[in-house]
Amino acid sequence: MSKRNKGSNDSGIDQKKFIELITGVLMKNPRQPLNYKQIASRLHITEKEEKRALSDALHRMKKEGLAEERGHGKFLVKASGGYITGSIDLTKFGYAFVISEEQEEDVFIAARNLRTALHGDQVKVLLYARHKGKRLEGEVVEIITRSRAAFVGTIELTPQFAFLMPDNKNMPFDLFIPLSKLNGAKQGQKAVARIVEWDQRSRNPVGEITEVLGYPGENETEMHAILAEFGLPYRFDPEVERAAEKIPAEITGEDIRERRDFRDVPTFTIDPEDAKDFDDALSLKTLPGGNMEVGVHIADVTWYVKPGSILEKEAQERATSVYLVDRTVPMLPENISNHICSLNPYEDKLTYSAVFEMDSKANIISEWFGRTIIRSARRFSYSEAQQVIDTGKGDMKEQMLTLHDLAQKLREKRFATGSFAFERLEVKFNLSETGIPLGIHFREFGTSNQLIEEFMLLANKRVAEFVGKKLKGKTFVYRIHDKPNSEKLSSFSYFIKRFGYSLDSQDVKGLPAAMNKLLNDVSGKKEQNVIETLALRAMAKAVYSTDNIGHYGLAFSHYTHFTSPIRRYPDMMVHRLLTRYLENQAPRDGEKYVRLCEHSSKRERLAADAERASIKYKQVEFMSDKIGQAFDGVISGVTEWGIYVEIIENQCEGMIAIRELQDDFFEYDEENYCIRGRRSGKVFMLGDKIRVEVAKADLQKKQLDYRLA
């Protein structure tokens, strides 16, 4: 090493370069103090003059706070700002970034400094001194919480040992499985493993198989694998089932005492055709003065599931039911969700109700909240209810048509005050008895869906207002939705101009009306799905919180979830808190509810991710026998590695890799959402209509590959 930079110091050696090289050595050994001889050895410095310059550079680093001296003449790289905590974002290459609210810039963590931290783990990080022009770097010093305890993958067996090769692309390490820890798993099977040991000196963690799922490609195996991948259960422990079975179905006089009796009031439910649990019902009667009394009746789950019970703990941990393409994984056992609490027709049921006196213009004259008993006279599917609304004929037509009229007026008022009108098509599969997808269709939302939606929104809103406005300062669980991210909104506004649409991203107040107009304008156009998807991505995500900031998307100052306690734990919390306040009891511990809100929000996101994964799997499975067939599609995404295309007739998304576009050299133009041919100038832009062939369907990766037709 003898390059010189004349004029940098008396010896002609560039001291800045020395400092950069020294920092690199010290950062590779952040906890091992090194003297200048050891550093010189690692840098292969042998000349006396350069060793002296290195020693000078070390003392300059100490003076400038870039290094600290430990003992006599031994140095460590100095932390720039102490410690931060954050979440690990692990790449497939083995290095990671830490995302922290305490640090605006993400912190780079080299693979050697991860200390066995994995994707999503909460960690404590020591920050290194940043050298000018270099990115912020650090090392993990403590794993606070693991993001996952289990890993799903495929067994690779050898005569001496086995590996579990994880499905998750964010897990770059195979798990070493001793043969004694296979628990019956065979070559090629999918299984669930947990890490039992991980020496920092070993690349691979040691694990044991906790459950064998079956062979890849089998429906039960794949659905269970998806649930296990997201840390979601797919069965109840026997003791939880037994506790549910012990709950008596009979309603006693004590159960009814102090409840309002609605059994003689016309009441019905509206649910999907395949629904097994019915947790909400509507009732209607005309009052003497001509106004109407509308009852929104919700299954009284907390009457049966007591605080501190094993059922309560199970519901709290699960926090939500999970909906995959072929099944529902309920939050509570079937005896509760489908029988005791389900508002089945012709049966007396205990409910928790929001009852409104309304005039013909859907104005609220008065309201009442409390426990009730009902008897549903009819179970409608959405299509059956829609037929009554459309024809004016059928069972309970007077009640149905009156409630429909009130719902449409509530809807008009909601949009007039700034509510968004996001109503995306829902992908549904026609499945064989063994779960093979035979076809894809879309569930459309008609006015029968709107009827239920508007009264559920009304109940949720008025319960939240009752606690938040009339009982100020009380601990409560709100469903909140923040204003959209300004950068994402600006980017979205820029993008839609290419289709001839406009949106003022700076006018937050006028945004709902402008967005609703845009969504109406794109309806039925080729770019509809792309624009709707990007519009949703520009919005913040709704979460649960005890700190009410309102719900921006609905334009409600107060909003909660009160109407689905069979399938959502936050609704159970709301029922319990409302009961306390109606009985004039003291508020609950706020910190406990903060933690429960965070947990429920996290579980909700996991459930949504699992649902998307199951849809993606079935889409790939559906397309797997269509290799070589051509379809019309729309470009739904553009990246530096390829273009994503969504087939119009079934919304199955796949990718055309840039390397497959062989007639030109294509480059990614991030600013204009396109890739462009360097020679031909040919452009593939987000939203363009395109014809593609199915090239490959990879079920293992849940990935479709297309090529230009």
Image (cartoon, helix red, strand yellow):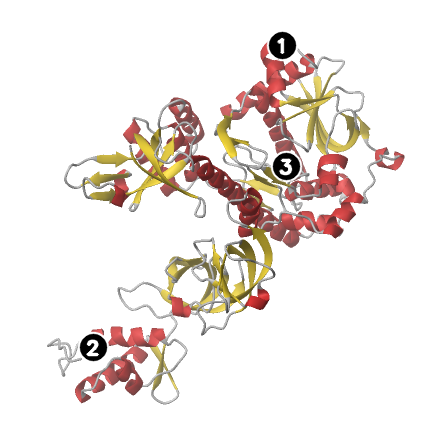
Kind of residue at badge 3 = Ala
Q: Observer-nearest residue: 472 or 599?
A: 599
Kind of residue at badge 2 = Gln
Q: Which residue is mark 1?
A: 392
Kind of residue at badge 1 = Gly
Q: Which residue is mark 2?
A: 15
Q: Residue at x 63, y 48 (%)?
A: 318
The alpha-carbon separation of the residues under discs 3 and 2 comes to 65 Å
Residue 230 image position (x, y, % from top left):
54, 50
Q: Residue at x 32, y 68 (%)?
A: 130
* Residue 482 visible from this viewpoint: no
Describe the element under mark 3 as helix, strand or loop.
helix
Describe the element under mark 1 as helix, strand or loop.
loop
Q: Which residue is mark 3?
A: 464
- Please rate how many residues cluster around mark 3, counting C-alpha atoms within 10 Å: few if below 14, some from 14 to 19, many from 20: many
Placement of 483 over or under 422, stated as above or below: below
Q: Observer-nearest residue: 379 or 261?
A: 379
Placement of 380 over or under 584, stated as above or below: above
Direction from residue 563 to residue 21 in the image, left or right? left
Q: Observer-nearest residue: 235 or 133?
A: 235
Direction from residue 141 to residue 391 in the image, left or right? right
Residue 531 image position (x, y, % from top left):
38, 31
Where is the N terminus found, in terms of image quarters?
bottom left
Q: Which mark is residue 527?
A: none
* Residue 98 visible from this viewpoint: yes
Are discs 3 and 2 less than 8 Å apart at CB?
no
